[in-house]
Structure formats: C-alpha cells, structure tokens
Amino acid sequence: MLANLRQRLDSWRVLVVFGALFVVSQATLAVIVQPLGADMLRVQTTLSAASVQAIFARWDAAGLLPRYAFHYRIDMIHPLWYSLLLAAGLAKGFAANAVPARWNILLLLPFLSGACDIAENLVHLTFLANRANITPDAVLLGNGAALVKWTLAGSGVLAVAILAIRAR
C-alpha cells in the first residue's frame, strides 16, 4: 500500500496540480481572514479558554465573526490540498535520494497533519455555535490538534526542503 502511494505521489503533475490548488486556497483564506489579524493564529495556538473567549468577544464586537465562520467553507477542504502537496513533495524527495521503502510510512504524516486540522476546525465550529463550548478541555482538544498540525506541517516542509537540497 505505501509503495503504491509513494509511486503515485512521485509525480511532477501531482506536485503542480496540488501546489496550484494549495496556493489558490491559501491565498483565498488569507484574504478572508486578513481582517482578523494576529488573533487568527492566537485562536488556534493558545491553550487558554479565557484567551479564546476574549478573541471571540473582540471579533463579535467588531462584527468579524461572520468572516471567521465563512473561512471554514474553504478551510474544511484546504487540509487535503496541503496534505497531498506535502506527501507528493516527500515522495519526490524520497525518489530523488533513493530513500529506502521502510521510510514510506512518513508519507502518512502530512495526512495526519490534515486530520488534525479538520479536528481543530470541528472543535472551533462548536465555539461558533455556542460560546459556552469554549471550555478548557475543548480548547485543549482543538488547539492541541492545531499545534500537532503546525508541527507536522512544518516538519514536512523542512523535510521536503532538505531532500530537495540533498538531491542537487
């Protein structure tokens, strides 16, 4: 299964298609959430329910909650684009560096990152539905998933960069 995944992802076409989808999706998200400012990153990374409640209160007072809610129309599919892009980058890098098949399991990490992103989104949607859902446990669950997402995605980008440099 993993050998087949590696073979299918080791494609310039896959890289270009999912790279383009990622760029368009990321740019669209950036435009949508731009008015939310740095609070957009804080609401994903804080482990404090009080901080999340304060951010939602500021957004509510400024009339920005509908914009935050709207971004989920794209952000629920966005993890698929970056998961496939990162996994394809890894597959290309593995092939270029003759990385042994035993490392193919690492191709799944971008998809784990994407799954964490979806979990974070689902928790945050409950916050939008009812502010009473912004509890310490829910923030820990949602934002813990976000922190894992960012760690895995960042590690994936770093790994792809290292593999690309080594291939030269």
Image (cartoon, rainbow, N blue to C red):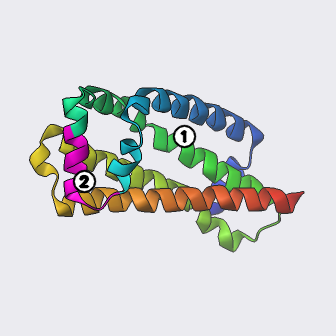
Q: Residue at x 62, y 45 (%)?
A: 85
Element carrying mark 1: helix
Eyeballing the image, is 111 above or below 128? below
Is residue 72 highlighted in magenta? no
Residue at label 2?
A: 51
* Image-based side of 16 in relation to 84, left or right: right
Q: Work out which quarter of the rendered image holds the N terminus and state it.
A: bottom right
Q: Report the front residue among 38 and 80.
A: 38
* Image-based side of 141 in relation to 20, left or right: left
- Residue 49: x and y in percent read 21, 57
Eyeballing the image, is 3 above or below 86? below
Q: Main secondary structure of the magenta part?
A: helix
Residue at label 1?
A: 81
Q: Which mark is residue 144?
A: none
Q: Report the front residue among 23 and 109.
A: 23
Q: Residue at x 37, y 34 (%)?
A: 36
- Residue 96: x and y in percent read 83, 58
Q: Residue at x 75, y 53 (%)?
A: 92
Q: Which residues are magenta?
A: 46-57
Amino acid carrying mark 1 in the image: Trp
Q: Residue at x 37, y 48 (%)?
A: 118
